Image (cartoon, rainbow, N blue to C red):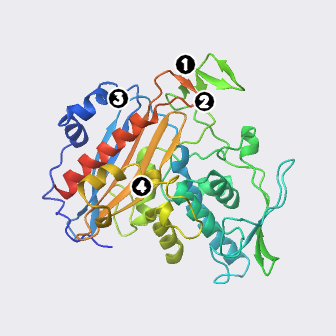
């Protein structure tokens, strides 16, 4: 996975406001959003893979940052859980004397943690045996951003372990505090259940129930009170919603996590060469493959391609495909969307040349200022991300 076709770092134009220039050059599509960038909390990170002075791949970086510091990362943090779950599995195998005997395909049994829960070890969507496995949960996360799959990965990794692994990689802003679409008190969100690894239906190892996690919040960040009101139980609460106890990661850290996962050969400026994740090659490749796939192309699990089009988990796709035909480009993405925020965290690679860029972006679009009313006008965000993907792809790949 080298840098074939990439221009040298010295030959690149180093424009600190490249992203602003690209958008300003097309006012018909970008002027209204640029004029309200602070209100939209618009943030963009572009990292173009280039050849360094020593011939190894590195990055040319450009940023755009408007509005308050905080943004809600939504489902984009599911990649954190997938990575941490893979690392936890390998650590557990080593601790249990099962190194080389357990894998992402090892069946799992989740013991109940909260009142009303039951033992879980079956997954009807898994056509190969109907069991719960980390590999299958990862595929569901990257193909259609399945919340239940994320929650299982989060619970297997454990809250403290997940945050520790991200910070050990240098992603210091990581603050993952809760499951998704499963509501508990903040202190209960940090608790995770006992999870057993099975062989022939019998436990061979387990991660124990964990009752403590990361005891932090977003109180020090600006912009954690969002909107002018929110819906709760069908009633309007006329005050901003607090995101002090919600998940968070800086956009640059989110992008660097993607680079560490997908392109460990790329040197990230400002980070030590050792930064990254000690993933098994097969585990890394499973995540790379799942992130590149489309729901309609999946055979396990199976999804309706009409309900889940190719762009479902690739917000940049329609724009990039205006520049390069779909079969000439690979897009690996983890998107997120909730509370009016839309996020993309993408790698885009031209197959024939190996030229590539990473693009992460987030914006908040909620015209009426009310959260939880499902009236966020996401098509506006879709058009922006598609158009952003197009102008960046034209800059990197040419017309």
Residue drawn at x 72%, y 65% is 123
Count of numbered badges drawn on the protein: 4
The N terminus, quarter of image: bottom left
Residue drawn at x 28%, y 69% is 351
The residue beneath circle 1 is 228
Determine whether label 3 and label 1 are within 8 Å by CB: no
The residue beneath circle 4 is 256
The residue beneath circle 2 is 372
Could you tell me residue 3's position as x and y percent?
25, 69
Front of the two marks 2 and 3: 2
Distance from the alpha carbon under mark 3 to that under mark 1: 18 Å
Determine whether label 4 and label 2 are within 8 Å by CB: no
* Residue at the farthest front position: 306
Element type where label 2 sits in the image: loop
Distance from the alpha carbon under mark 3 to that under mark 4: 23 Å
Of the numbered discs 3 and 4, the one sitting upstream in the chain is 3
Element type where label 4 sits in the image: helix
The residue beneath circle 3 is 37
Of the numbered discs 4 and 2, the one sitting upstream in the chain is 4
Left or right: 48 as drawn, with respect to 274: left
Of the numbered discs 2 and 3, the one sitting upstream in the chain is 3
* Residue at the farthest left position: 11
Front of the two marks 1 and 4: 1
Of the numbered discs 1 and 4, the one sitting upstream in the chain is 1
Of the numbered discs 3 and 1, the one sitting upstream in the chain is 3
Could you tell me residue 281's position as x and y percent?
49, 76
* Residue at the farthest right position: 115
Element type where label 1 sits in the image: loop
Above-or-below relation of 267 to 154:
below
């Amino acid at each position: 996975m080298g840098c074939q076709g990439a221009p040298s770092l010295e030959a690149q134009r180093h424009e600190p406001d490249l992203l602003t220039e690209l958008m300003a050059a097309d006012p018909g599509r970008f002027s209204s959003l640029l004029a309200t960038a602070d209100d939209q909390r618009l943030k963009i990170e572009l990292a173009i893979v280039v050849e360094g002075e020593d011939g190894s791949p590195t990055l040319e970086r450009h940023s755009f940052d408007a509005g308050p510091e905080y943004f809600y990362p939504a489902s984009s943090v599911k990649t954190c859980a997938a990575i941490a779950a893979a690392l936890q599995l390998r650590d557990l195998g080593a601790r249990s004397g099962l190194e080389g005997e357990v894998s992402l395909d090892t069946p799992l049994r989740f013991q109940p943690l909260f009142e009303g829960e039951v033992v879980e070890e079956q997954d009807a969507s898994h056509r190969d045996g109907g069991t719960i496995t980390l590999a299958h949960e990862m595929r569901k996360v990257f193909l259609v951003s399945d919340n239940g799959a994320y929650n299982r990965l989060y619970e297997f990794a454990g809250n403290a372990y997940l945050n520790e692994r991200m910070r050990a990689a240098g992603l210091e802003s990581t603050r993952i505090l809760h499951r998704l679409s499963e509501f508990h008190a903040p202190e209960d969100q940090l608790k995770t259940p006992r999870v057993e690894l099975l062989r022939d239906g019998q436990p061979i190892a387990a991660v124990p129930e964990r009752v403590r996690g990361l005891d932090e919040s977003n109180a020090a960040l600006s912009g954690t009170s969002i909107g002018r009101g929110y819906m709760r139980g069908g009633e309007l609460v006329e005050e901003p919603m607090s995101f002090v106890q919600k998940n968070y990661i800086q956009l640059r850290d989110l992008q660097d996590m993607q680079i560490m996962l997908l392109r460990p050969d790329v040197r990230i400026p400002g980070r030590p060469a050792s930064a990254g994740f000690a993933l098994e090659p097969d585990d890394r490749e499973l995540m790379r493959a799942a992130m590149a796939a489309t729901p309609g192309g999946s055979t396990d699990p199976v999804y309706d391609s009409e309900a889940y089009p190719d762009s479902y988990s690739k917000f940049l796709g329609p724009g990039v495909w205006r520049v390069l035909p779909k079969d000439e480009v690979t897009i690996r993405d983890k998107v997120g969307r909730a509370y009016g925020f839309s996020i993309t965290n993408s790698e885009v690679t031209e197959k024939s040349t190996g030229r590539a860029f990473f693009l992460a972006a987030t914006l908040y679009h909620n015209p009426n200022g009310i959260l939880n009313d499902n009236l966020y006008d996401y098509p506006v965000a879709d058009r922006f991300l598609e158009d952003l993907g197009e102008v960046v792809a034209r800059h990197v790949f040419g017309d």
